[in-house]
Image (spheres, coloured by chain):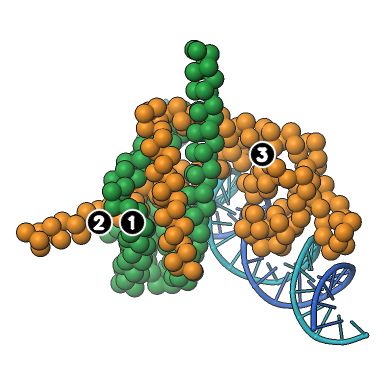
Chain colours: A green, B orange, C cyan, D blue
Amino acid sequence: MNDVNTTNDVRVLEYQANKLQELISELHNCCKERYSHEAKAFKMPQAELRCLMLFEGHKYLTGIQIAGLLEVAKSRATVIIENLDKKGMVQRSQDPNDARVKLINLTPAGQRKVREIEEFMFALHQQLLDQIDPGQRTGVITALETLRSSMEAVKAQLA
Amino acid sequence: MNDVNTTNDVRVLEYQANKLQELISELHNCCKERYSHEAKAFKMPQAELRCLMLFEGHKYLTGIQIAGLLEVAKSRATVIIENLDKKGMVQRSQDPNDARVKLINLTPAGQRKVREIEEFMFALHQQLLDQIDPGQRTGVITALETLRSSMEAVKAQLA
DNA sequence: TGACATCGTTCATAATGTGAACTATATTTA
DNA sequence: TAAATATAGTTCACATTATGAACGATGTCA
């Protein structure tokens, strides 16, 4: 009896681990498609869109902050900022307190673009919510929070 | 009273849409990190790993099938297959029934690599499952399935 | 048989990203 | 205070991921 249960438990764990793998992979693919769709809609590279969105709640950011938030090398951040500058979306200026630092901020055109992207993203997620049965919405969000913490715990274990 | 409820409903929807956006974005980042970690662990580009895994359940695949399964252009598939060939992981041969087609299959080295990757991925998802409270596992999987269908429904609407 | 479609390849191009080397500043320490 | 060290940003070489057009070799169908 105990043996049978143990065997069953192992099978359930196996099934659930495989199911998780499959579902997470599919969600990841869906997101990839979504981001590429967004980039086409705004006719801008994904990296530049992500960079613009960092300014929500920040008047100024430095290059190193942007690199940290985007989780890329600072050399990559330099290029992204340069391209946004060329497009007139951001401005660079010297930090009066530290001559090494450049302060980056949105231009009015950049601010408009951020609002457009926000609206686009919000509409998309409203649509997603619409597709979820109202009674299940809280459950889905709670489950995602559980999954997120668990994934971060695994990441911490590996590091 | 009705006005108050309507206003509340809108606020809840707004909150939930934003929460979904945040959670999905975080999960996506977690996955990206995971895939890049995997690629480093196996000292192979992600695209090649993904390609190898397509052979689970297939003895032979054609270039066009691989492009379709990886969701990339066929020119991209050619390059990935070429690199796997150079590494001795796959072989190319002529399809006896159609001279245009090349049949691609795993070499023994490729088969060994696939098993290694499978074990690695399975262990990782077992670890993830370990982090989820046993009572919540079914709920998390069900919620992910709901989310997946909803995301696919939105995608279908957009197309 | 000719028109058209398909499979794989090659090439030009673009986006995303890293790491090392370098310049110009700050900061810390001997 | 002078020297060692650290930090911010830039530049460059390189790798990976990806697309689309053009092309040759074949296959299919009217």
Amino acid at the residue labelled 1: Leu
Q: Secondary structure at mark 3?
A: loop
Badge 1: chain ID: A
* Residues packed near mark 3 inside 10 Å, few (<14), some (14 to 19) or many (20 plus): few
Q: Residue at x 41, y 50 (%)?
A: B147
Q: CA distance from mark 3 to mark 2?
A: 44 Å
Amino acid marked by disc 2? Leu
The circle drawn on residue B43 is: 3
Q: Is residue A127 visible?
A: yes
Which chain letter goes with mark 2? B
Neighbourhood count class around disc 1 (C-alpha, 10 Å): few under 14, some 14–19, many 20 upward: many
Q: Which residue is mark 1?
A: A129
Residue A139 rendering spot, x and y as whole percentages: 31, 43
Callout 1–callout 2 Cβ contact below 8 Å: yes
Kindly identify the residue that appears in the image at 66 percent across and 43 percent down: B53
Q: Nearer the viewer, residue D18 or A75?
A: D18
Secondary structure beneath label 1:
helix
What residue is shown with label 2? B13
Above or below — where is B61 with respect to B106? below
In the rendered image, which quarter is residue C12 located in?
Answer: bottom right
**Numbered badge on residue A58:** none
A154 up-or-down from A1: above or below: below
- Give the quadrant of the N terminus of chain B: bottom left
